[in-house]
Image (cartoon, rainbow, N blue to C red):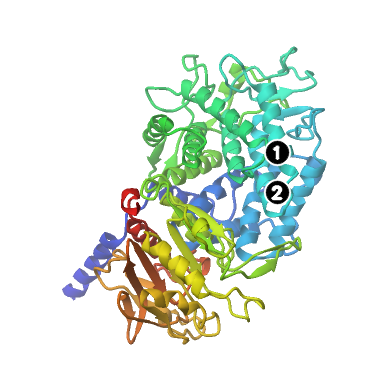
């Protein structure tokens, strides 16, 4: 009996040693999913309600899902929203008549759920929130009132609650005029609430000057509250990410953010790296370093650097801030859960009992552990910081996704015809949104080519990705490969381009014409279908990766279903095989490289963790393939 006991002891130990160490964002997510299992309970004495706190947390959970491809994070998001949203798209506990901007924030999660699942109930629920904005009371300038119960008032908080959702909706559902309205919310708040001397923004602004807290001349509240400032910064950088590049007011928003960043940098506590609750009064009695604001400042600044809105010189401020947050606020409790300390529960203006905006008022609000706004802000911050780890690897490189040979179209819910099937923007099963995100994590820009390949339009591309060439079942008027197109692409590869061919199996792609291209490199796609998977018997689609594989060195198993096998001749070679067929082939021609496989296997359905068991490492494989592709790009000097 002794041996089985020893075995039972050793096996868990070995298993634990093989498990990768959890990141801090995974640890804090475990805390979230432990203490708020079904939905967010902010006060045990009150019924659960539709609240912005949950939206802050779920944006962090969403980012972690994208990073890890672990389906449990998506399931948690969906469960939390399904607690409120019924099959008709109604939102439990929500009242449109409240005209409360706080109620808009969770709409961002609804949009994600709609885009991923296609379920109209999420669209209908999000539409309710969009309709609220259409009739939201406004100031005379046009700024949204924070709530109906706060007439003529704009608060910095409100811009985070409403504008990122508003921008995401406008971009997705074709409301270009809305971007003027969105830009104006920030422009007006910067004009009305910004202190010219410090560059900081006051918590609130009362157009009527009727509130006791309002300055009779300016209408501003008395103090610069850190979290309000942080809400504003987070809102602005999230909105900028959605803004059309050619919009006339985008440059104004970038300049507003740059002024914001400079002001925030000046009031960072140099000793801790964090920020005080009343941001400009660090030595005032009772003031304290605050975790939610510190997390949001770091997150907003880091994202702005990544997106190019701030120079890299801000990185020292960001790094010091993040290290300070980890040291000052992150801890482990008696149950072994990672917790976040030092978050103020709330701070507001007016209301009943009346909040006068004085320093004494701000200091009177409770500071607690694991406030959802703090936890959510830190989770978003940690996820953003992780996005910077590999950016330098592919910085300045571009991947071009073909939309000519694969040019399927589909109408969206508004009736607008859009490119469809293996596209960067698509979050649905057939989309490449997660693959695009992987390229972004390596610093590679994603672009789309909807025209036939030419010397001119391939010139700026480092990687050219062609997926699933159309047959007549996909597209009644397909654009076939021609000898001329194949020659153009061949010469581009020879000069140093990296060509990626993700074809498809018999019945799902065109072979006769398309093979003109891979055959120039010694690669031929056979019009057949291997690796067929009956039902959900995923094991039949599994492909083991041998140790030492040059392309996927850290991956043990991938999943490909219904694959076109490959034959090769010089200069092409097999890079991965299964039984009697070639799965991966590569070729070196001139200064360039070709990678080919007979399946579009890196689309969302097989990378997002919602379907496949965790043993299939397609998202990890996407990361390793992207890393390998970048390494094949010759240096600029070598290309000349």
Q: Is residue 327 left or right of residue 489?
A: left
The residue carrying mark 2 is 170
Q: Name the mark on residue 333.
A: none
Question: Does any portion of residue 132 appear in the rendered image?
Answer: yes
- Kindly identify the residue that appears in the image at 48 percent across and 60 percent down: 435
Q: Secondary structure at mark 2?
A: helix
The residue carrying mark 1 is 182
- Kindly identify the residue that appears in the image at 76 percent across and 63 percent down: 415
Question: Does any portion of residue 45 appear in the rendered image?
Answer: no
Residue 631, image x, y percentages: 32, 57
As rendered, which of 626 and 165 lies closer to the eye?
626
Quadrant occupied by the N terminus: bottom left
Circle count: 2
Choose top left, top right, bottom left or bottom right for residue 597.
bottom left
Q: Secondary structure at mark 1?
A: helix
Choose top left, top right, bottom left or bottom right for residue 416.
bottom right
Report crowding for label 2: few under 14, some 14 to 19, many 20 or more residues within 10 A (C-alpha). some
Q: Is residue 92 above or below residue 350?
A: below
Residue 578, image x, y percentages: 33, 81
As rendered, which of 262 and 458 lies closer to the eye?
458
As rendered, which of 350 and 436 lies closer to the eye?
436
Mark 2 touches mark 1? (CB < 8 Å): yes
Give the mark nearer the N terminus: 2 vs 1. Answer: 2
């Amino acid at each position: 009996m002794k041996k089985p006991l020893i075995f039972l002891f050793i096996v868990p130990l070995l298993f634990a040693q093989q498990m990768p160490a959890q990141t801090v964002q995974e640890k804090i997510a475990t805390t979230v999913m432990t203490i708020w299992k079904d939905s967010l309970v902010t006060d045990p004495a009150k019924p659960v309600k539709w609240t912005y706190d949950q939206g802050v947390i779920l944006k962090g959970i969403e980012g972690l899902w994208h990073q890890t491809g672990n389906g449990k994070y998506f399931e948690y998001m969906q469960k939390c929203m399904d607690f409120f949203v019924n099959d008709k798209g109604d939102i439990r506990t929500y009242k449109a008549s409240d005209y409360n901007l706080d109620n808009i924030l969770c709409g961002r999660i609804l949009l994600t759920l709609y885009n991923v699942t296609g379920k109209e109930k999420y669209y209908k629920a999000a539409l309710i929130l969009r309709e609220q904005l259409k009739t939201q009371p406004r100031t005379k300038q046009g700024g949204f009132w924070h709530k109906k119960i706060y007439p003529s008032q704009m608060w910095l908080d409100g811009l985070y609650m409403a504008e990122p959702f508003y921008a995401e909706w406008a971009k997705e559902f074709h409301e270009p005029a809305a971007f003027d309205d969105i830009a104006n919310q920030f422009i007006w708040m910067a004009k009305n609430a910004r202190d010219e001397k410090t560059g900081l923004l006051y918590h609130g602004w009362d157009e009527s000057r009727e509130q006791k807290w309002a300055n009779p001349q300016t209408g501003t509240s008395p103090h610069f509250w850190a979290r309000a400032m942080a809400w504003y910064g987070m809102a602005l950088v999230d909105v900028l990410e959605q803004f059309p590049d050619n919009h006339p007011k985008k440059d104004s928003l970038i300049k507003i953010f740059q002024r914001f960043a400079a002001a925030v940098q000046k009031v960072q506590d140099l000793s801790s790296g964090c920020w005080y609750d009343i941001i400009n009064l660090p030595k005032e009695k009772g003031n304290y370093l605050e975790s939610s604001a510190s997390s949001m400042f770091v997150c907003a600044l880091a994202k702005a650097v990544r997106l190019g809105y701030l120079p890299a010189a801000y990185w020292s401020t960001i790094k010091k801030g993040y290290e300070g947050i980890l040291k000052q606020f992150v801890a482990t409790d008696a149950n072994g859960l990672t917790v976040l300390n030092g978050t103020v529960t709330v701070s507001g203006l007016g209301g009943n009992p009346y909040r006068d905006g004085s320093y004494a008022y701000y200091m009177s609000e409770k500071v607690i552990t694991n406030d959802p706004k703090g936890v959510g802000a830190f989770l978003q911050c940690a996820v953003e910081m992780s996005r910077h780890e590999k950016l330098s690897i592919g910085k300045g490189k571009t991947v071009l996704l073909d939309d000519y040979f694969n040019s399927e179209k589909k109408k969206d819910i508004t009736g607008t015809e859009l490119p469809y099937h293996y596209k960067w923007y698509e979050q649905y099963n057939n989309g490449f949104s997660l693959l695009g995100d992987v390229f972004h994590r390596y610093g590679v820009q994603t672009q789309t080519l909807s025209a036939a390949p030419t010397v001119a339009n391939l010139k700026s591309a480092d990687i050219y990705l062609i997926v699933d060439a159309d047959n007549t079942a996909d597209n009644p008027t397909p654009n076939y490969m021609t000898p001329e197109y194949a020659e153009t692409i061949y010469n581009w590869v020879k000069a140093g381009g990296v060509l990626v061919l993700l074809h498809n199996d018999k019945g799902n792609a065109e072979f006769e014409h398309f093979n003109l291209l891979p055959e120039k490199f010694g690669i031929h796609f056979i019009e057949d279908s291997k690796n067929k998977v009956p039902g959900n018997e995923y094991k039949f689609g599994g492909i083991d990766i041998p140790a030492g594989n040059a392309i996927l060195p850290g991956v043990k198993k991938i999943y490909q279903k219904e694959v076109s096998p490959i034959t090769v001749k010089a200069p092409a070679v097999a890079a991965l095989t299964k039984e009697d067929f070639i799965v991966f082939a590569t070729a070196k021609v001139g200064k360039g490289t070709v990678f080919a496989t007979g399946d579009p296997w890196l689309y969302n359905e097989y990378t997002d963790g919602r379907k496949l068991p965790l043993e299939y490492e397609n998202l990890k494989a996407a990361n390793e393939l992207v890393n390998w592709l970048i390494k094949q790009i010759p240096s600029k000097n070598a290309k000349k």
